[in-house]
Image (cartoon, helix red, strand yellow):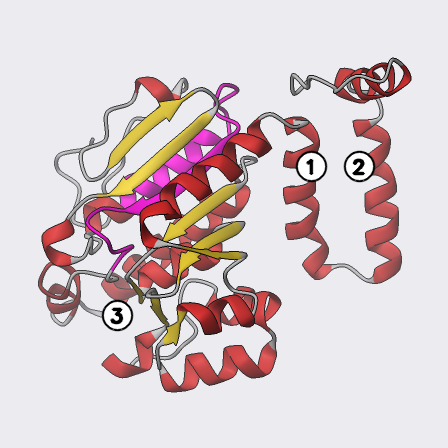
Amino acid sequence: MSDDAPRGQETYAITPPVRDYRPRHFLLEVAGKTATITLNRPERKNPLTFQSYAELRDLFRALQFDDDVKTVVVTGAGGNFCSGGDVFEIIEPLLSRDMPGLLQFTRMTGELVKAMRACPQPIVAAIDGICVGAGAIIAMASDLRVGTARAKVAFLFNKVGLAGCDMGACAILPRIIGQGRASELLYTGRVMKGDEAERWGFFNRLVEPEAVLVEATVLANELSAGPTFANAMTKRMLHMEWDMSVDQAIEAEAMAQAVCMKTEDYRRAFEAFASKQTPVFKGD
């Protein structure tokens, strides 16, 4: 890490293989092809700091170049996901920053979401308890979300006098739950409880609290055992096609699918089908 950088401008030297990296501000475990990131300040419901934002950003950037990790699970310790930016370590210090300093911070937080969307690995969030503010954004920026009935999700930026348009929320959230529902959450900052989050499509599935990390990991492992090159292509196209017309999307998908047809996994799938066996994918 650069020791002389102002808070929010830290950089962390993270190079593949990510499994060898030892984070300073959260936990990281790589088992098989799945990396599990655990936000680990349970006494405060796992809030983010300038440093954890930066280290998470740099970890997801490194994952773009990691061939070993095929899926990522993000969770929180102690029965909560994340309580957002730490009130005393982020929100209070921001009061004394000038406009360039504030813009530097808000751009840095946005870079975390960009890095999550750019990494080829599908990200599964395991969400229990409090999931608010920047925590809700991290959940939103994940590809899939496993939650609990007692989870409380809130984009509460307006509760602290800010706009709901934080870290891509106005672009991404409507695409998950719809424009009207996203508007309600972003204008009011109210809590979306677990059953409502599942009903609205924010949670892909609802499980018991003791099973949330297990279920998320099982899902991640299933994806890791699949055609991971093709999964990465799917993630890329889901992101890119937001800005395409239908005709452009059809052409882009034609090209993407033609690339996937040249993979060995595609050949393996055919050969397995022809011999009435289950394909064993290798991601090449």
Relative image position of residue 183 (x, y in whole percent): 51, 82
Of labels 2 and 3, the one closer to you: 2
* Residue at 19% over, 39% down: 25
Pick the front one: 165 or 107: 165
Q: Secondary structure at mark 2?
A: helix
**Disc 1, disc 2: CB below 8 Å?**
yes
Q: Amino acid at mark 3?
A: Met
* Residue at 53% over, 28% down: 70
Pick the front one: 189 or 2: 189
Q: Which residue is mark 1?
A: 233
Displayed quadrant of residue 217: top left
Pick the front one: 21 or 193: 193
Q: Is residue 156 visible?
A: yes
User: What residue span does the magenta drawing correspond to?
Assistant: 54-82
- Separation of disc 2 and disc 3 at Cα? 42 Å
Q: Is residue 218 above or below residue 52?
A: above
Q: Amino acid at mark 2?
A: Ala
- Looking at the rendered structure, which numbered label has been put on residue 256? 2
Q: Secondary structure at mark 1?
A: helix
Q: Which residue is mark 3?
A: 99
Q: Amino acid at mark 1?
A: Met
Displayed quadrant of residue 264: top right
Q: Is residue 255 above or below residue 88?
A: above
Relative image position of residue 222 (x, y in whole percent): 57, 32
Mark 2 neighbour class, 10 Å CA radius: few under 14, some 14 to 19, many 20 or more: some
* Residue at 50% over, 25% down: 65
**In the drawing, does residue 244 fall left or right of residue 59?**
right
**In the drawing, does residue 139 fall left or right of residue 100?**
right
